[in-house]
Image (cartoon, helix red, strand yellow):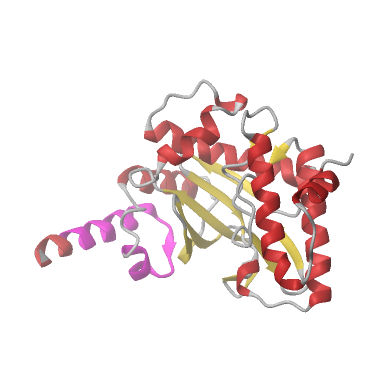
Amino acid sequence: MKEKLDKKVRRIDTDIDKLRIKIKDSNSLKLEENVFDEPTLKNLYKLSRKDFIKELGGSISTGKEANVFYATGPEKELAIKIYRITTSTFKAMDPYITKDPRFTNIRHTRRDIVFAWTQKESQNLKRAISAGVRAPEPITTEKNILIMEFLGENEVPYPQLKNITLEEEDAKRIFEIIVEYMRLLLTKANLVHADLSEYNIIIDPNTLEPIIIDMGQSVTLEHPNAREFLYRDVQNILRYFSRYGIKMSPEELLSKIQAK
């Protein structure tokens, strides 16, 4: 078993060397072996050749379908989101993408769904930003890799809403901004986040402004389950902010979000 593991580590070392990217913490990357399969390494190599990535750093977060890494580019800090091709729960992804009219023609294979999901998140982020929602700016994609602006300080990402404690006055202001973002997504971007909660909102500690993240599953209003997803988002936000004394029915919040 040890010999087999050593061979895997040596192979990852060799593959990383081939990338021609400066690796800031290669030991931490070795622990993410299921992310760095051969196709992903080739895609990273393409991005480095195109001068998008200069230095690849350590892990920022690990989700159900993707890992996010810190990186630097020629001019700015980056967040590199890599969707895992071999271990992504693509069956859970399928309802969000095959019913989306923008992606009805994709093949129902794991690889094609993951690639389309990456494109979908990039498109959704662009639409959200254009509508006036604060979200990470997407820079480029390559197959299962999405490069975005890094939102944080000293290589540490801004905290998730779930990990901070707010004063009631600040909580009310952040709640109102989130409601406005939900309204803009719906009425200007024609989108429903579809997984909005304290896990997918980060807070800029300098301004105490919320930032919406993780929009791969977001759907247009033409999606047959869009209203169901919106109602779930509303319930999640109301549940979280009830701890700060904010009381509102889902119907009241929906009326605010749907206002033109």
Q: Nearer the viewer, residue 67 or 245?
A: 245
Q: Is residue 136 visible?
A: no
The correct choice, above or below, for 235 with respect to 155 in the image is: above
Residue 31 placement, left or right of 53 = left
Residue 75 placement, left or right of 175 = left
Question: Which residue does the image show at 31% across and 57% down from the upper left?
Answer: 33
**In the rendering, at what x and y percent does residue 149 appear?**
63, 56
Q: Nearer the viewer, residue 224 or 16?
A: 224
Question: Which residue does the image show at 61% across and 33% down from the upper left?
Answer: 225
User: Is 24 one of the magenta-colored residues?
Assistant: yes
User: Is 92 one of the magenta-colored residues?
Assistant: no
Magenta stretch: dominant secondary structure? helix
Picture quarter containing residue 185? top right
Q: Which residues are magenta?
A: 7-30
Quadrant placement of the C terminus: top right
**In the rendering, at what x and y percent does residue 103 appear?**
56, 26
